[in-house]
Amino acid sequence: MSSASLPYENATSGKAAVEDMRKLLLAFGASSFGCMEDFGNGEVIVQFAWRERQVTMRCSAKGYAAAWLRVHPYTHRMRMTEAQHRTRAMQQAQVSVYSILRDWLRGQITAVEVGMLSFEVAFLGNLMLPDGSTVLERITNPSHGAPLLKVTDER
């Protein structure tokens, strides 16, 4: 096993973090909250409404699994097949993304509550527009005209 580690690789709260998010948003004054999984894209999606502002946050479990596999590459000395190792990575990712979303949401809400950021600044990329897209999707999607911003997956 590699000595390197990845943040949240030992997370165990998984879907219990959904209840934590619900409590955070309720205390913050959100009027609605929902969480779902997009199995095809390997994403966890959190949506909530606050003072007539709709927010959609997406977190890639596939992205986390790929990062986990870079830190913990498969070797033939493991007592599992490569496919089983990849499955293990995705299982951990599906737990970790909930904890990451919960902590990110907690940080953004705290920044708004203490006056460090406005709600719009804290959630700008995730704010939903009247057509159902987010601000980030609008400025990065060529179907809305020339993209205003290029987003890369490079870390």
Image (cartoon, helix red, strand yellow):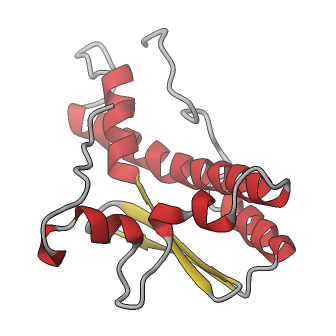
User: Image check: 7 left or right of 143?
Assistant: right
Q: Quadrant of residue 69?
A: top left
Q: Residue at x 63, y 62 (%)?
A: 15
Q: Quadrant of residue 17?
A: bottom right
Residue 7 shows in the view? yes
Relative to 30, say whether 122 is above or below.
Answer: above
Q: Residue at x 22, y 50 (%)?
A: 150
Give the quarter of the figure containing the C terminus: top left
Relative to 149, say whether 86 is above or below.
Answer: above
Provide residue 55's location: percent of width, then percent of height.
54, 75
Provide residue 63's location: percent of width, then percent of height.
34, 45
Give the quarter of the figure containing the N terminus: top left
User: Image check: 147 left or right of 58?
Assistant: left
**Viewer-proximal residue among 46 and 15:** 46
Provide residue 58's location: percent of width, then percent of height.
44, 63
**Viewer-proximal residue among 155 and 70:** 155
Relative to 59, say whether 152 is above or below.
Answer: above
**Viewer-proximal residue among 23 and 150:** 150
Q: Residue at x 63, y 40 (%)?
A: 11
Exactly how many numbered labels are in the figure? 0
Q: Residue at x 74, y 80 (%)?
A: 30
User: Image check: 83 left or right of 57?
Assistant: left
User: Image check: 150 left or right of 104?
Assistant: left
**Viewer-proximal residue among 8 and 142:** 142
Residue 45 shows in the view? no
